[in-house]
Every structure is written in C-alpha cells, then in structure tokens.
Image (cartoon, rainbow, N blue to C red):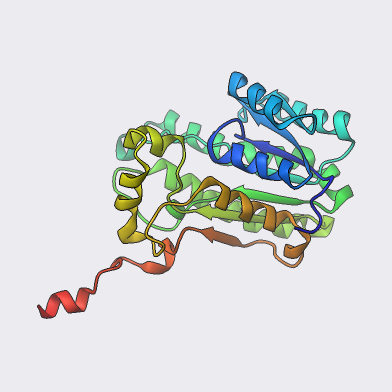
Amino acid sequence: MKGLKGKVAIITGSATSIGASVATAFIDIGAKVVIADIAEEAGARLAGQLGENAVFIRTDVRNDDDLKAAVNLAISEWGQIDFIVNTACTYLDNAMDSTREEFLEALNVNAAGGFMLVQFARPHLKATKGAVVNFGSISAKVAQPGRCLYPMTKGAIHQLTRNEALLLAEDGIRVNTVSPGWTWCAIMDEVSGGDRKKTDNVAAPFHMKGRVGDPQEIAEAVLFLCSDHASFITGTDLPVDGGYTALGPEQQTDALGNLAN
C-alpha cells in the first residue's frame, strides 16, 4: 500500500492477538512500530521477533505518563509519529450487574486511553499529516445478551472518532474506526478450547462469509485506513465483519419461507 514504508506507528494493545497482527502487518510493509502494551513478556518477545524496526514499551493506557512515554520513545527512536492505532481494550463486563467502578474502568481503558494518546501525539501527527485508527466493533451497533459495558464503550469510540476527525481536520489528521466482526483471537481460542472449526460453525448463521475473521484481515483494513489510498476518508467506520452488520436479525434463513411451511 502507498504511503506506509518508513512511517512510524504507535499501536496500543499490540503484544498479542489482533493487535500483534496489526503490528506485524506494519513491519511487513516496511513501517516501524512501537508496541505499547501492559503485557511485558509478550510485548518484548514480539518486538524481538519483528526485528530492529519494532520496539516495546510497557504501557498502561490508564496512565498518562505511560502514554507520554510511548510518544517520547517513538520520537527518540525515529523522530516522527505517523499513525496511532488504538487496539487496547478490556472485556470487563458484568452486564446489568456491573458496578460503577467497572463501568468507569471499561470507559477508561477502551475509550479514554486512546483519546489521551492521540492528544499527546497530536503535534507529531500534525507534522506528518498522520492518521488515527480506533478500534470499534460490531458490538457498538447492536444489543447483545449478557453484555453492557463492552458494547457501550465501543459505541463511545464511534462517536469519539467522529468528533476527533472534525477537531483534528484542521491539522490534516484523519481519524477512522475499524469494526471487526467475530475474529479468531485469544478469547475465542480460550472459550472454544482452541476449536476453530466449531467457532466458524457457531458464527456461520450471522456472518455472510460463514466463518469468523482472521486477525490478518483486520490488520489489512487498518493498513488501508492509514495508507494514501484512504486520503479522503475520515470520520467514518470500516466494518470488517464478514457481512455481520448487513445481514440483520433474520440471519441466513428464509424467515418468510419458514413461516409458509
């Protein structure tokens, strides 16, 4: 993709899972990455695997000093920041039994952390006419049983993205969200007992593609939104969901046909 080689990205939550795939995709295309994550062992290991164009810094997105340190590291290592990718999140969610503390924790990690990082990186993003990709979700757009906090925070991210895009347009900074559907990741691996086939089968009725996504497919969408190919795209959401949001509640069954039978 045009406009990515040699550029510098800070990627939160990128030590493992989808975030690690995003970091790897940037490296593979010739960019440089700061892996900003709370998981020290996994982050250091990934940075070692990705080579000299990747550095790791322990980053708790709830801590402004940590976020500032990630910005400073990017500048000290490579002298610029072109992209911020906010993948860090918590799945803390006890639905209607969630406490106030849990509610605020979910907002702090999933929305406030990325907002503050963009704020701290803004002067550098302005200098490079950079881009921000926030991670939304299909969960932002529908009600889901047994959940409340995670969808709420993802909805907040979508509105935050629209406002950031407007407020940062004067700096030449583009801001968008990417919204994955069900994607094979650490949580799905854990819940399914490592059974990808079972996971695909469960997901099939409500994904047009009949399967969950691969992390690399999400990473490619992030690269696109950061690339020159997306130069006129800002303030919007790119669903990478295998047709989940387009399908609707009738899923892939012929509801009227079933009614007639």
Rendering coords of residue 70 (x, y %): 75, 29
Rendering coords of residue 173 (x, y %): 78, 55
Which quadrant of the figure contains the N terminus?
bottom right
Which residue is most to the top? 41
Residue 130 or residue 261, whichever sits in front: 261
Tell me what residue is drawn at x 50 percent, y 48 percent: 214
Q: Is residue 259 above or below residue 60?
A: below
Tell me what residue is drawn at x 78 percent, y 40 percent: 121
Which quadrant of the figure contains the C terminus?
bottom left
Asked if residue 87 shows in the view, the reply is no
Rendering coords of residue 143 (x, y %): 35, 54
Q: Is residue 135 above or below residue 258?
A: above
Q: Is residue 252 left or right of residue 152?
A: left
Q: How many marks?
A: 0
Asked if residue 34 shows in the view, the reply is yes
Tell me what residue is drawn at x 30 percent, y 68 percent: 252
Hey, which quadrant is residue 190 in on the image?
top left
Which residue is most to the bottom? 260
Tell me what residue is drawn at x 52 percent, y 58 percent: 240
Rendering coords of residue 32 (x, y %): 78, 39
